[in-house]
Amino acid sequence: MASMKDIKRRKESVSSTQQITKAMNLVATAKLQKAKQSVLEARPYFEQIHKTISSILATSQGINHPYLEKRDGKKVLYVVISSNRGLAGGYNSNVVKLVTKHIRENQNDSTLVIAAGKKAQDSMKKEKVELLDAYNGLIENPNYEEAKKLSEQVVDLFNRKDADEVYVAYTAFHSTLSQEAKLMKLLPLSPEDFKLENEDDNQAMMNYEPSEEEVLNYIVPKYVKSLLFGTLKESAASEHGARMTAMDSATNNATEMIDKLTLLYNRARQASITQEITEIVSGADAL
């Protein structure tokens, strides 16, 4: 059995750690409320653009556009969204595993990565994947202007055919206790992903001026911007939710450990007192 001094020192160490995890839990909870509201405010804009593209593809025929063209090459660009810090459970590792699994399964000719978050940047370097750029400040406080820069870089790489396919890896926010790592295809657009929910909406053919191609040329970059902005918002909320859950679990584990150490300390103290009494009685008998 460990000495009383060692147990007491261990108990103080765990108690100190518990105070830190409790503070981090409170901070994450406060940030989560703001991030959750931001996600809810951003969703309608993305949903409307998605509906507009769905309407164009459903009510038009024979559209030939670079954003819809499936290329033969296998140059793939991944936008990987993670956090800058750890202590968030499996939040970062789940996204990285999703990307690395996709890379191995598809055997790309070349793989490029744009990282949003230090954890993604570090992990991709370990995987020896070419890191094209990093937006580590973007995940802390996602804003539309920074998301616009990222989306313009992505669209430009696709238009110059430096990337034949573009994917974004992020963590979707479902609830405080539920977050899901996802890999979504950004470009080229697949008509199968833009089905109208109401089949009656695609009955009437529509005319676009100057043309469907020109409308897509204008709206698809906006769609990419809104999608990246939305995934950044979702990932930020998911990070706070994951960290809150992880710190709450760590705090509870620390409480259980303190209880066990308290029990061990009391047993050690009782054994010490019993030994002292035994020594006193033995000494008295000897006299």
Image: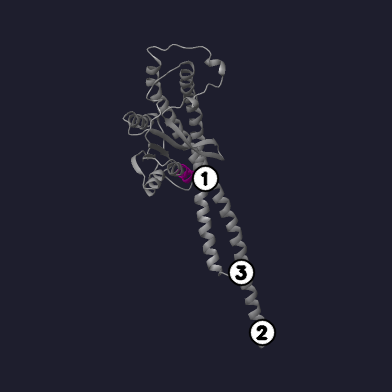
In the rendered view, tell whether residue 208 sits above or below residue 86.
above
Q: Does label 2 or label 3 sit earlier along the sequence?
A: 3
Front: mark 1 or 3 = 1
Q: What residue type is labelled 1?
A: Asn
Residue at image mark 1? 25
The x and y percentages for residue 116 are 39, 39
- Give the residues drawn in magenta, as a range: 90-98
Q: Residue at x 63, y 72 (%)?
A: 271
From mark 2 to mark 1, how far is it between C-alphas? Answer: 57 Å
For image coordinates 62% across by 65% down, the residue present is 266
Query: Which residue is disc 2 drawn over?
Result: 284
Query: Quick one: quadrant of the C terminus?
Result: bottom right
Residue 61 is tagged as none
Label 1 to label 3, Cα distance in Å? 34 Å
- Horizontally, residue 114 falls left or right of residue 91, namely left
Q: Nearer the viewer, residue 56 or 150?
A: 56
- The amino acid on which the numbered mark 2 sits, given as a three-letter code, is Ala
Q: Is residue 224 magenta?
A: no
Badge 3 is on which residue? 269
What is the spatial separation of the Cα atoms under label 2 and label 3, in whole angstroms? 23 Å
105 left or right of 274?
Answer: left
Q: Which amino acid does label 3 sit on?
A: Arg
